[in-house]
């Protein structure tokens, strides 16, 4: 490696150190996109093969990702057994996969963990191994523009949504910046160019009020646990919609 190359590498490292996790992700995606895509596809294939070998030929009843969970939370203690009983699942016929290993945030020293978690999350999506995402609001905001989430109204009837709201479980709405077409870029009043229009999108269901979810202690280690909004999201690549709805119904009804 020449002195010039060494100097360039050094400047890149210094530049990365000054970035926050979101800026680092954008930078790496811009300059190493195809390498990352290749890595994600390979990782997704490896995860798929490992899961297939581990569980044999049993089909997945549901694949759930619980983001930023406490290290002490073990889904095998209550969540998996409770869902198995609630949905009448035969463990010999199908399996429930719940991944609690990923963390995405701005905590000091968490940049590498966040980057690894982002890669794993995208790998699971690429492999179609994500049906539900349960995560703090901050994680959902992080992926607002990524198209990873399905509007709940696409899978839940208006009556079901109204029942959820009556129980205190509101749709999680956010504004998403949407570019406008060239035809509408000029205003009828004053011929001023618009920067963009804000569109309200529904990303999931706010399940922060779930007594059952709180009893699991998933986010007990968080300093903001009491004020934290927890969002239930249907994955855009979900293959198990009915199973996902069963999980949501259990979270909002089980005490």
Image (cartoon, rainbow, N blue to C red):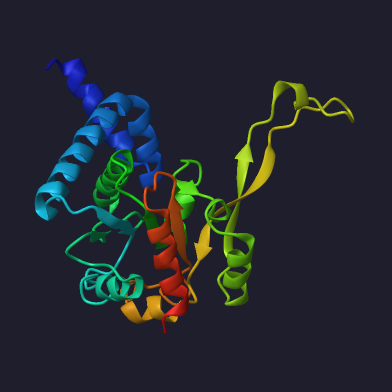
Q: Say which of 7 and 39 sits in front.
A: 39
Quarter-wise, where is residue 105 in the image?
A: bottom left
Q: Say which of 97 and 7 sits in front.
A: 97
Is residue 197 left or right of 89 when viewed as pictured? right
Work out whether residue 179 can be spotted.
Answer: yes
Q: Say which of 68 and 165 sits in front.
A: 165
| Residue at x 30% of width, y 50% of height | 114
| Residue at x 68% of width, y 35% of height | 196
Quarter-wise, where is residue 236 in the image?
A: top left
Q: Indicate the quadrant containing the C terminus: top left, top right, bottom left or bottom right.
A: bottom left
| Residue at x 44% of width, y 77% of height | 226
Query: Furthest residue to the right?
Result: 189
Residue 172 place in picture, x, y as percent: 56, 60
| Residue at x 69% of width, y 25% of height | 181
Q: Say which of 242 and 28 sits in front.
A: 242
Residue 240 place in picture, x, y as percent: 37, 53
Look at the picture and state if 144 lies above or below 82.
above
Quarter-wise, where is residue 103 in the image?
A: bottom left
Look at the picture and state if 5 lies above or below 72.
above
């Amino acid at each position: 490696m020449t002195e010039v190359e060494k100097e360039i590498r050094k400047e890149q490292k210094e530049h990365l150190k000054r970035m926050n996790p979101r800026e680092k992700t954008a930078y790496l995606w811009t300059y190493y996109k195809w390498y990352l895509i290749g890595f994600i596809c390979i990782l997704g294939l490896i995860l798929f093969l490992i899961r297939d070998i581990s569980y044999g030929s049993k089909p997945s009843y549901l694949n759930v990702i619980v983001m930023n969970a406490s290290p002490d939370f073990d889904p095998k203690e209550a969540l998996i057994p409770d869902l198995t009983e609630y949905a009448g699942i035969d463990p010999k016929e199908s399996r429930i996969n719940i991944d609690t290993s990923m963390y995405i945030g701005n905590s000091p020293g968490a940049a590498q963990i966040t980057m690894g978690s982002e890669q794993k999350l995208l790998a699971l999506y690429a492999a179609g191994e994500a049906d539900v995402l349960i995560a703090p609001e901050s994680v959902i905001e992080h992926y607002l523009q990524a198209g990873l989430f399905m509007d709940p109204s696409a899978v839940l009837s208006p009556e079901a949504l109204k029942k959820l709201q009556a129980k205190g479980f509101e749709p999680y709405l956010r504004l998403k910046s949407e570019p406008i077409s060239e035809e509408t870029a000029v205003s009828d009043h004053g011929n001023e160019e618009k920067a963009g229009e804000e569109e309200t999108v529904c990303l999931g269901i706010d399940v922060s009020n779930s007594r059952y979810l709180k009893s699991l202690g998933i986010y007990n280690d968080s300093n903001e646990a009491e004020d934290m909004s927890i969002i239930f999201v249907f994955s855009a690549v979900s293959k198990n919609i009915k199973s996902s709805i069963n999980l949501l119904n259990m979270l909002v009804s089980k005490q």
